[in-house]
Amino acid sequence: MALYTHHLPAWKREQVEEIKERFAKYPVVGLVDMHGIPASQLQDIRQNLRGVAEIKMARKTLTHRALDEIGGEAVEMGEHISGQSALIFTLENPFKLYKQLELTKTKMAAKPGETAPEDIVVAKGPTSFKPGPIVGELQQAGIPAMIEGGKVKIRETKTVVKKGQVIDAKMAGVLAKLDIKPMDVGLILKAAFHDGTIFAPETLAIDETVYLNQITLAAQQAFNLSVNATILTPTTTETIIGKAAQEARNLAVEACIYEKDVADLIVGRAYREMLAIAMKASEGGFELDESITQALAAAAAAPAAAAPVAEEAPAEEEEEEEEEKEESGMAGLGALFG
């Protein structure tokens, strides 16, 4: 904690007290970097944040003084003060504050000496430039250019500045002519203070799509676990009962238990097995009954007929047709095995 032994002039004391009062009033306080923001854009940012957040600019020494007098964890906020810093106060939570400040950013052309915030890529393709000195300027900047169809064309996509590298004057000029604006200009949140905790910007930079997908996956896995562990809940009860009914039906079919709901499934399965045996027998040279031969031909012509039988009982108007199929199947079994 810094020690202040000199007396503050009245106007400085007022600013310190104002910062302290806002710290007490607002649950979330952020420290933002305002470097490079034009005055006109700053006015727009203030307008966009009206009703959401309040910006307070003060000298760094006065901000340090206020933080020291507040004490506690707030003092650590002073470690993030550098350059053209300002305080921002809001009733929103730190994550919403970060997202709101990200929305205030706009793209601007790079100035000589600035650091690339990300890889700067020039895409291949035609430009709006006519042949002239621009071709040499592009090539001197390391951008492969040529003349085609009376226009200057970039021959291949190329990364001209790596993230973290300084943009020199020549490159800045070329990027401006190509209307490439790599610089994010806006309030950059450097730290946020909430309930005694200081949040770094990387902690607040949440990809909502990723989190939503993770929550969705977790919900699906919880649902599957509940079903497989037979944990009855309002969400899973219907699925668990349906699963139990299906397993009971499959068991009855496997064990050939002739109950009303599964008899048709058992007969259908036996019929398909009969056809499989008949096909093997035919391939081995055995002569088959004409009805079996016709059944094999029908199965070969319509493979969709081998699809699983629907779980629901056939409607009344289809019962006669189903009975005929069952009788035909039984007759086929008798013809095959004598």
Image (cartoon, grey):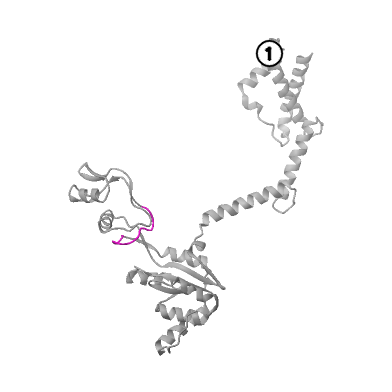
Between 147 and 119, the residue placed more toward the observer is: 119
Instruction: Check residue 30 for magenta coloring.
Output: no
Q: Does residue 105 lie above or below 223 as drawn?
A: below
Between 63 and 255, the residue placed more toward the observer is: 63
Residue at (67%, 51%) from the top-left corner?
222
Task: Name the residue type under label 1.
Answer: Ser
Q: From the top left corner, tell me how far across and down residue 216 is, in percent.
A: 59, 52
Q: From the top left corner, tell me how far across and down residue 264 is, in percent.
A: 76, 30
Q: From the top left corner, tell me how far across and down residue 116 is, in percent.
A: 36, 58
Q: Does residue 27 lie above or below 8 as drawn?
A: above
Query: Could one spot residue 39 in this view of the protein?
Result: yes
Q: From the top left corner, tell me how far across and down residue 108 is, in percent.
A: 33, 61
Between 12 and 100, the residue placed more toward the observer is: 12
Instruction: Please give left or right for residue 67 compared with residue 301 in the image.
Output: left
Instruction: Check residue 115 for magenta coloring.
Output: yes
Query: Could one spot residue 93 in this view of the protein?
Result: no
The magenta stretch spans which residues? 109-119
